[in-house]
C-alpha cells in the first residue's frame, strides 16, 4: 500500500517546519518528515569556508533528485509530511509530476509579512528579505486542500490538518 503525503507550502519562516513536527507528534501513525532545510543545514551539501554551501551549483540536481526520492518513500508505504517552498510554477509542476498517482494533501501555510520578517530576524539563519520575497509568489499557482494561518499554535494547526486530511471522502491523486 502506498503512503500518503501531507505537503506544507509557504514562505520561508512561515512555520512549516514547526507545524510538520507537530503533525509527527500528533498523528496516530508514523510520518517521516522531509525538508530541503535538512540538506541546507545538515551535512548533505558540500561546505566551503564559514558554512557557505554550493547551492547555485547543486540546486537543480538536488531538487531533481529530491522529488522522486519523496515519491520512492511514499511508494514504499511510508507516510510523509514535507515542508517546502514552491518558488516557481515550474517547480510546483515538477513536484506534481514526480508525485503523480500518490495521495498528496496540499496545505498552504500563511503568515502576515510583519510576522515573517520578525521570525526571519529572530532566526538569523536566512538573509533578511527572503521571507517577504517568497510571499510574493509562493501561493500564486497552487490550489490547496486546506489553508492554515501559522500565527495559530502549531498544535492547533496540526490537529486541523490531520482532521481534515483524515475526513476526506477519498484521497487526492495528481
Image: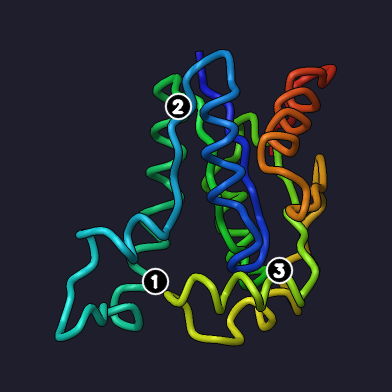
Earlier in the chain: of badge 1 and badge 2, it is 1
Q: How many discs appear?
A: 3
Find disc 1 in the rendering and name its residue: 60
User: Which coloring applies here?
Assistant: rainbow
Q: Residues within 10 Å of mark 2 (few under 14, many from 20)?
A: some
Question: Under tag 1, what secondary structure?
Answer: helix
Q: On residue 87, which mark appears?
A: none
State how far apart marks 2 and 3 are (Cα): 27 Å
Give the percent coordinates (x, y) of residue 153.
72, 43
Task: Kindly report which numbered mark, 2 or 3, lies closer to the viewer in this rendering.
Answer: 3
Of residues 34 and 90, the one nearer the viewer is: 34
Along the horizontal axis of the image, is 99 left or right of 152?
A: left
Q: Report the residue at 58% width, 49% height from top.
A: 97
Task: Specify the quadrant of the image occupied by residue 157.
Answer: top right
Answer with mark 2 or mark 3, whichever residue precedes in sequence. Answer: 2
Q: Is residue 8 left or right of residue 68?
A: right
Where residue 8 appears, as percent x and y from the top left, is 64, 48
The image quarter in which residue 55 lies: bottom left
Q: Whole-Å distance between the Cαs marked 3 and 1?
A: 18 Å
- In the image, residue 32 lies at what x, y percent? 43, 32
Q: Are marks 2 and 3 in contact (CB under 8 Å)?
A: no
**Which residue position is annotated with label 2?**
75
Residue at image x 35%, y 83%? Answer: 56
Q: Position of residue 80 (x, y in %)?
A: 50, 33
Q: Is residue 84 left or right of residue 51?
A: right
Helix, strand or loop status at disc 3: loop
Earlier sequence position, callout 3 versus callout 1: 1
Q: Is residue 145 left or right of residue 66?
A: right
Distance between the alpha carbons at the discs numbered 1 and 2 = 23 Å
Q: Residue at x 45, y 52 (%)?
A: 35
Q: Which residue is mark 3?
A: 138
Amino acid at each position: 500500500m502506498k503512503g500518503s503525503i501531507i505537503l506544507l507550502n509557504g514562505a520561508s519562516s512561515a512555520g512549516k517546519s514547526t507545524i510538520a513536527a507537530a503533525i509527527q507528534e500528533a498523528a496516530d501513525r508514523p510520518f517521516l518528515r522531509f525538508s530541503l532545510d535538512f540538506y541546507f543545514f545538515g551535512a548533505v551539501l558540500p561546505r566551503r569556508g564559514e558554512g557557505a554551501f554550493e547551492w547555485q551549483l547543486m540546486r537543480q540536481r538536488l531538487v531533481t533528485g529530491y522529488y522522486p526520492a519523496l515519491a520512492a518513500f511514499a511508494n514504499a508505504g511510508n507516510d510523509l509530511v514535507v515542508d517546502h517552498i514552491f518558488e516557481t510554477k515550474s517547480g510546483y509542476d515538477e513536484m506534481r509530476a514526480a508525485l503523480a498517482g500518490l495521495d498528496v494533501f496540499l496545505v498552504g501555510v500563511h503568515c502576515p509579512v510583519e510576522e515573517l520578517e520578525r521570525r526571519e530576524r529572530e532566526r538569523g539563519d536566512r538573509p533578511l528579505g527572503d521571507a517577504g520575497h517568497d510571499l510574493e509568489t509562493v501561493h500564486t499557482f497552487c490550489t490547496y486542500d486546506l489553508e492554515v494561518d501559522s500565527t495559530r499554535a502549531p498544535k492547533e494547526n496540526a490537529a486541523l490538518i490531520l482532521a481534515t486530511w483524515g475526513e476526506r471522502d477519498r484521497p487526492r491523486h495528481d
